[in-house]
Image: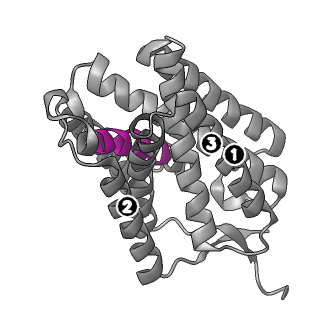
């Protein structure tokens, strides 16, 4: 690379407004898509988790082996993390009987442990410094834990805390507004704010997804999980095709 260039391209996208729009849509798709397999297809949470774990591992391997940033591959991997997160969280919360509070607490500990080990190993957890397979592995494991935590946290807010899907959406939207305000008007670490926003978009997507497909008596719109998933996937693909995403630039 030219010595005058102080940056190198990565295989993750620049964090822009459209990045967050697609991220929220992908997390919502993860909820409706995960429920489609585990509930609508009656395969159960364990089988659903096994299926989506296999997809997740295949996507991560493909992402790590890729030589450049490919938007479709990147977002496919994100969707894989959020679908496995949905079924895994539901399996832990419901099938294992841990409950939403226990599941959220356990997953929060796992997420924090992932970040701590990542930082201890590489000296940073910034998404703008991913330049090796090891860093990518930490990145995707952390994302998977954050997506799983988001599902459990969304369920806890809507059900255990009694806020319902609309109330949960308002809470997480308000918290994201706080993060955005902190980004523009404070000097808080950009890395900390990135992960805070990344984590918060998942429970927002979870409660929105549940609002779309849960029965009317449970406070949802009772939409078809298949139709909602197809619509969300179409929206994500449209955003990827219409809005060019560039690979993030990283300092040497």
What crowding class fits label 3: few (fewer than 14 Cα within 10 Å), some (14-19), or many (20 or more)?
some
Name the residue located 53 percent from the left edge and 77 percent from the top edge: 245
Front residue of 131/167: it is 167
- Above or below residue 176? Residue 171 is above
Residue, disc 1: 54
What crowding class fits label 2: few (fewer than 14 Cα within 10 Å), some (14-19), or many (20 or more)?
some
Q: Residue 149: percent from the left, percent from the top? A: 50, 32
Q: Secondary structure at mark 3?
A: helix
Indicate which disc residue 197 carries: none
Q: Are marks 1 and 3 in contact (CB under 8 Å)?
A: yes
Name the residue located 28 percent from the left edge and 21 percent from the top edge: 159
Going from N to C along the chain, the mark reached first, 2 or 3, is 3
Residue 201 in the magenta stretch? The answer is: yes
What crowding class fits label 1: few (fewer than 14 Cα within 10 Å), some (14-19), or many (20 or more)?
few
**Would you say residue 142 is visible in this rendering?**
no
Question: In which quadrant is the N terminus drawn?
Answer: bottom right
Going from N to C along the chain, the mark reached first, 1 or 2, is 1
Residue, disc 2: 230
Q: Residue 167: percent from the left, percent from the top? A: 19, 33
Q: Secondary structure at mark 2?
A: helix
Quarter occupied by residue 237: bottom left
The CA span between labels 1 and 2 is: 21 Å
Name the residue located 46 percent from the left edge and 81 percent from the top edge: 241
Q: Residue furthest top?
A: 97
The CA span between labels 1 and 3 is: 5 Å
Q: Residue 127: percent from the left, percent from the top? A: 64, 56
Residue 235 in the magenta stretch? The answer is: no
Residue stretch in magenta: 197-210
């Amino acid at each position: 690379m030219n010595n005058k260039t102080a940056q190198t391209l990565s295989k993750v996208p620049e964090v822009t407004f459209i990045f967050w729009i697609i991220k929220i849509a992908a997390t919502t798709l993860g909820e409706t898509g995960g429920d489609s397999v585990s509930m609508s297809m009656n395969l159960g949470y364990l089988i659903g988790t096994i299926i989506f774990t296999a997809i997740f591992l295949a996507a991560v391997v493909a992402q790590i082996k890729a030589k450049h940033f490919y938007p479709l591959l990147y977002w496919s991997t994100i969707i894989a993390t959020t679908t496995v997160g949905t079924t895994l969280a539901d399996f832990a919360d419901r099938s294992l009987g841990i409950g939403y509070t226990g599941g959220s607490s356990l997953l929060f500990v796992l997420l924090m442990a992932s970040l701590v080990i990542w930082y201890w190993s590489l000296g940073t957890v910034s998404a703008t410094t991913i330049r090796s397979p090891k860093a990518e592995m930490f990145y995707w494991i952390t994302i998977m834990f954050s997506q799983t935590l988001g599902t459990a946290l969304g369920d806890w807010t809507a059900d255990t805390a009694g806020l319902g899907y609309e109330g949960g959406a308002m809470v997480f939207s308000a918290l994201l507004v706080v993060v955005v305000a902190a980004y523009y008007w404070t000097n808080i670490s950009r890395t900390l704010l990135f992960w805070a926003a990344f984590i918060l978009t998942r429970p927002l997507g979870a409660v929105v997804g549940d609002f779309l497909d849960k029965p009317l008596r449970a406070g949802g719109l009772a939409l078809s999980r298949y139709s909602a998933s197809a619509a969300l996937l179409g929206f994500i693909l449209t955003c990827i095709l219409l809005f060019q995403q560039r690979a993030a630039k990283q300092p040497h």
